[in-house]
Structure formats: structure tokens, C-alpha cells
Amino acid sequence: MTLKIAQRGAIPPFIVMDVMRAAAAREARGKDTLHLEVGQPSTSAPEKVLKAAEEALRNDKLGYTLALGVPELREKIAEHYQKSYGVSINPERIVTTMGSSCGFLLAFLSAFDVGDRVGVCSPGYPAYRNILRAVGIEAVDIPVGPETGFNPTPEIIKNFGKNLDGLLLASPSNPTGSMLSNVELKSLVDYCAMNEIRFISDEIYHGITYGKQAHTALEYGDNSIIINSFSKYFSMTGWRLGWMVIPEELSRSIECLAQNMFISPPTLSQLAAVSAFDCCDEMDLNVLRYSKSRELLLNELPKAGFGKMAPVDGAFYIYADVSEFTDDSLSFCSRMLDETGVAATPGVDFDPERGHHFMRFSFAGSTEDMAEAAKRLIAWKK
């Protein structure tokens, strides 16, 4: 007897997770590995967050919270937007989520119907298109490249994104690290408003920038959906906690979806994260370390032949052109891991059409690991 298997699970893998598995298998065989494949800070959560978590473990029953999150954290997030961007947000518009991935799912389910069309940039975070496909929404690739600094423009969207119901983009971007200026971001928000396109802004890498200021789409109106997370800037990947800022008209829909699908975000993570916004000095030291690693790799990777790179204005990634070496970035990354112990992510994870000529290096790890990785790659390509 053969039982049915639903087609919604027949989506491409998140290849970076496959690379992580291969790297772990290498380590299990006793071989050292340098992790430049995963966008995970090598530092722990802020000290005040750890102390708050310990206090909650000892004194709170850690039961369910409201589906949209504990009020104290929602208020803290609202204060963050006022202090960081000068934007006043009603805490009722803030939804805490089980990581940003949960936020994307809630956004897609609440804003779009089966068969709707949502534009996503290529290269871009692969889970966007894969989650959209799983819930029956068409992901429309918007190709971007070096001619626009790997950023979309209204003209590009008009040419490639016909009849869109939504547009999703990130600034700073994964995998390229490219950023939109305030003028560029406003032009995209305005374009979507004029064409009745729901704008979703992934702002998960805000706080991690190099000489440029990140802007939130909330500066240009209340109709955008904002997705953010405690994973990257606050070094809290495994705490599985993110947040959304939503238009008021989506509030009840998202609340009902969250109640039924997730009940509530992790209580311990929420109570601890209330202290996160008091730890920016500590987090900025991490950004300084990323900056040093970025400078090191920008100087050293060209010596290994990886000289054609996207702008690295924010986040902690370098997206490099490897067409000089291969037209199969998947096998190239596998061979590089096997022969050098340096794990990186093939570009096909981010751009199925053109990514076979690219790969992504993450410099979220220690600067010492970045230096050793560069040393090995230089020796490998000689």
C-alpha cells in the first residue's frame, strides 16, 4: 500500500543546512572545519539577557503567553523604533514570533491567498521562495546584479514583476550584504503603494552595517509588514525569537493564525529578550569584530582568486563570483570543504538560475577563523 505524500513538502532544500551537515560529518571524522557557511554569530546572547533568563527560570512558571507576545517585550520593541529611527509605533502593532521564519509564514498566510504572486530578489534568502511555494503562493524572481549594486529598483520590478500582489526584500541583504539608501527604499515603498502591492521588509540585519545607516520601511508609511529577529545583531539564534510590525488591518488575522499554529512564542526567550535593548554597547563590540573580519577577507580573498564581490555594506556575508573556477558552485563548495576544511555556501541556494557562478562566505565567526580560512584558500588556489 502506498499512501499519499503531500506536494507542499516537495520544495528545494535549504542548502546551507546541507553544508552544515557535511561540515558536522567532517568534524565527526576528527577533521577540523572552519565555518564560513552559516550566518550565526560565534558569540553568545548579551550578558543581561543571560541573567534575565536565569532569573526567569528560577522565578517564573514559564507558561503560555499571549499569542502576540508579552506586553513588556512589545513595549520595548516599540521604544526601539522610536530611539533608533524616530518612528512612533503602537505596541499593539507588534507581534513577537518564534523566530523571523515564523514571521514570514504569518505574513504570507495573512496577506496573500493561494495563487497570489510575490516578488523576491535573486540572489536572495532561499527560504522566502520555498515557504511561499509550500503555502501555494507564487514566488516571482526579480533578478538583481552588480549594475545596481545587487539592489532592486522600481524599473526592475516593473520589468520582471508583472501583476505582483506582494514584494519582499531585505536591506542589508542576505547573501550580498548590499543595502538600500533611504531614497531607494522610499522609492520602492512608494512604487508598491501606487500599484497596490503589499510590501514586506526583512530588516533582520539592522544594526550590522559598515559606514551606512539602515532605514526601516516604517519611515515611509504604515502599510508595510516588517520582519526582524533577535538572532543576528543580538546573537540569539537558538533562542528562536523574532518580531513583526504589522498594519492594523492584519492584526486579528495574524493573531488567529498565531493562536492556532504556534499558541505563543517561547516564554523564556521573551522574558529574557526584554533586556536585549539595554545591551547595544555589548552588541556593537560584536559589530566591530565583524568589521575587522570583513576588512580582512576583502583584502585576502582576492589573493585566492575571489576578487569579484557584491557590496558588503551590511550583514556578515561576502557574495563572490567563482565563474573563473567553476560553473557548478555546489560541487565547488563540496570540494573546497573536503580539500581545505573551509565550509561555504554555494550560490545556487540564493539564485537557482545564476548562482552556479557564485558562493557565499559568512564572516560571523571569529576573526581568527577568518584569517585561517583565508590562509588556507590562498594556499589551495596557488
Image (cartoon, rainbow, N blue to C red):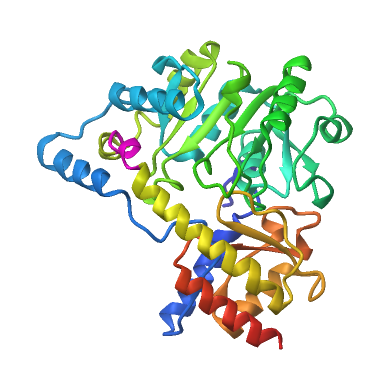
Residue 22 sits above or below residue 188 on the image? below
Instruction: Say if residue 161 shows up in the picture.
Output: yes
Task: Confirm whether residue 259 shows in the render.
Answer: no
Counting from the top left corner in percent of width and height, residue 179 is at 66, 43
Q: Which residues are magenta?
A: 273-279
The C terminus lies in quadrant: bottom right
Q: Is residue 321 above or below residue 331?
A: above
Q: Residue furthest top?
A: 249
The part of the image, by quadrant, that contains residue 277 is top left
Residue ranking furthest to the right = 159
From this view, report whether residue 122 is shown above or below residue 290: above
Looking at the image, which is closer to me, 26 or 273? 273
x 51%, y 27%: residue: 85
Magenta stretch: includes residue 176: no
Q: Position of residue 214 (x, y in %)?
A: 58, 37
Residue displayed at 29% across by 33% down: 274
Q: Which of the 4 quarters of the picture holds residue 215?
A: top right
Tell me the residue at 47%/13% (across/down). 252
Indicate the position of residue 18 as horizontal and vertical percent values.
56, 64
Occupied quadrant, residue 116: top right
Residue 348 locus on image (x, y percent)? 72, 59
Is residue 267 rendered to the left or right of residue 346? left
Q: So how many labels did they put on this image? A: 0
Residue at coordinates 48% horizontally, 77% vertically from top-left? 33
227 sits left or right of 173 in the view: left
Residue at the outermost front position: 211
* Between 129 and 74, the one nearer to me in the picture: 74
